[in-house]
Amino acid sequence: MTNIYKKLYDACTKAGTVKKADKKSGMHFNPLLHDDVQEVAVQALLNEGLYPTCSYQTITNTDHVMITCTLTITDVDAPSNQIIIDGCSAMGQLDKFGTGQAMSYARKYAFLNLLNLKTGIVDDDGHKAKSFNNNKKPTTKNADTISVKEIINSIKASKNWSDLNFIKNIKYKSCFDNAIKHHPSVYKMIMDHYEQKEMMFKR
C-alpha cells in the first residue's frame, strides 16, 4: 500500500496550475480565487485517494475577526493515516461577510501550502505587496504615505501600552483601517508584531 506521504507527493507533482482571475476595476493585482484553488487542490488529492476536511478557530476582537484554518488530509485506504496543516489564518471585518471571507482566505492558503500549487503569474496578492509611498510625515498618518516597515518599527519601539495604543488607534489608524480592508496579509503581518508587543505589556 502506498503511504500517505507518497500519495501527497504524487498529488503535489501532478496537480494542475491555478490560473488567476482577471483584474477588476480598482484592483492592483490579479486575484487568486478560493474556488479556483479549491477545485485544483481537491481534485489532485482525490486522484490519489486523499480526502481533505477543514476545521476553524474563530477569535473576535473589537474591530475584526481572525479565522485560523486547520486542514486535515485523510488517506481513504487507511483512515487512521492523516496529515494536518495547521495555522493558516486570515482577518475579516465585523460584518455579515467578514467571517466567510476570512474562512475562504485561510482555506485557500492552506491548500496552497499543502500542495505548493503553481499559479499562472507571480503571486502579488500579499506576498509581493508594495509598501505605501513614504513621502509625507503628517502627525496623523495617511494610509497612502506610510511604509509597512515604518509601522512595524514604531510598534517595536513602543515602550508601554499607551505608546502601542497611540500607534494603532491614532498615529497609524488610517493605515490599519486600509490594510484590513484591502491588504489582509499585510494587516496580519503588522498585527503579528502588534500582538507580540501587546503580550509583553500584559505580563
Image (spheres, rainbow, N blue to C red):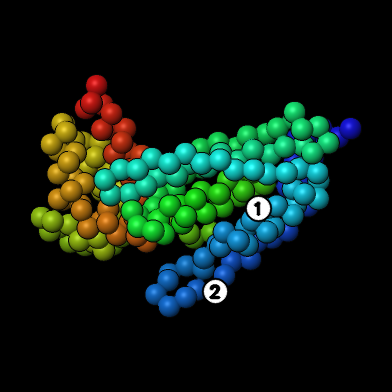
**Label disc, if present, on residue 117 of the rendered structure:** 1
In the image, taking residue 170 as reference, residue 193 lies left or right, namely right
Q: Quadrant of the N terminus?
A: top right
In the image, taking residue 14 as reference, residue 178 lies left or right, namely left
Residue 104 in the image: above or below residue 190:
below
Q: Position of residue 163 (x, y in %)?
A: 14, 38
The residue to which callout 2 is attached is: 22
* Amino acid, disc 1: Leu
Dot 2: element: loop
- CA gap, disc 1 and disc 2: 19 Å
- Disc 1 crowd, CA 10 A, few/some/many (<14, 14-19, 20+): many
Marks 1/2 in contact by CB < 8 Å: the verdict is: no
Q: Position of residue 68 (x, y in %)?
A: 48, 41
- Disc 2 crowd, CA 10 A, few/some/many (<14, 14-19, 20+): few
Residue in the picture at 21% in, 46% down: 168
Residue 158 in the image: above or below residue 185:
above
Q: Position of residue 170 (x, y in %)?
A: 14, 50
Residue in the picture at 55% in, 62% down: 32
Residue 34 placement: quadrant: bottom right
In the image, taking residue 130 as reference, residue 9 lies left or right, namely right
Residue 143 in the image: above or below residue 153:
below
Q: Position of residue 9 (x, y in %)?
A: 76, 41
* Amino acid, disc 2: Asp
Residue in the picture at 83% in, 36% down: 77
Q: Is residue 11 visible?
A: yes
Closer to the camera, 101 or 123?
101
Q: Quadrant of the C terminus?
A: top left
